[in-house]
Amino acid sequence: MNKIFKNLLVFLILSISLVALAKTGVALSNLEVSPNPMEKFTTVSFDFVGEASLSVRIIDKDGHTVVTLGEGLFTEGSYSYNWDRVDNEGRIVPSGKYIVVVDSTTRFVTKRKTLILK
């Protein structure tokens, strides 16, 4: 990816985040999943501005919640969750593609990132 395209992409992401902040009073940025692909564990992290009820989940290819990492009222700050491949029922999750979803039922805030389990 050339430097001009990278700079344009960063500008667009910042612009979209600023528009979201201006319209809703909240913004979610820097959603990261590392390591990705994962084998035994991964860390999901993001920055949040504002105040809203959020849910941090990992869903499968069919849209079903595999595990809820965090839920509740979030205020401005940086957040980080560790996941060890265990679902909400205490079972080890099989290899495959999953999606990390951070969303809100009270505000228009949604971010998604693909997670690959080896």
Image (cartoon, rainbow, N blue to C red):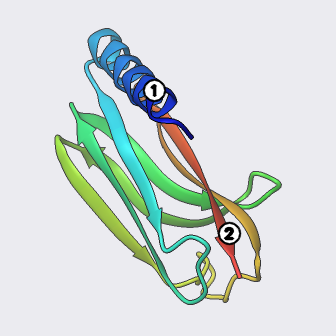
Query: Relative to 104, does residue 36 appear above or below in the rendering?
Result: below
Q: Which quadrant: the C terminus?
A: bottom right
Rounded to the nearest angstrom, the CA distance separating label 2 from label 1 is 29 Å
Amino acid of disc 1: Ile
Secondary structure under badge 2?
strand
How many callouts does the rendering have? 2
Q: Please give the residue where the numbered disc 1 appears in the rendered image.
A: 4
Q: Please give the residue where the numbered disc 2 appears in the rendered image.
A: 116
Query: Residue farthest to the right?
Result: 62
| Quadrant of the rendered image containing residue 65 | bottom right
Crowding at dot 2, Cα within 10 Å, few <14 / some 14-19 / many 20+, comes out as: some
Query: Residue farthest to the left?
Result: 76
Q: Position of residue 105 (x, y in %)?
A: 47, 33
As drawn, is 86 to the left or to the right of 26?
A: right
Of circles 2 and 1, which is in front?
Answer: 1
Q: Which quadrant: the N terminus?
A: top right
Name the residue located 53 percent from the left edge and 57 percent from the top edge: 57
Secondary structure under badge 1?
helix
Query: Relative to 33, does residue 2 appear above or below in the rendering?
Result: above
Residue 49 numbered mark, or none: none
Q: Along the polypeptide, which appears first: circle 2 or circle 1? A: 1
| Quadrant of the rendered image containing residue 39 | bottom right
Q: Position of residue 60 (x, y in %)?
A: 74, 61
Name the residue located 51 percent from the left edge and 28 percent from the top edge: 5
Name the residue located 59 percent from the left edge and 61 percent from the top edge: 58
Amino acid of disc 2: Ile
Name the residue located 39 percent from the left edge and 55 percent from the top edge: 71
Q: Position of residue 4 (x, y in %)?
A: 45, 26
Q: Position of residue 94 (x, y in %)?
A: 76, 83
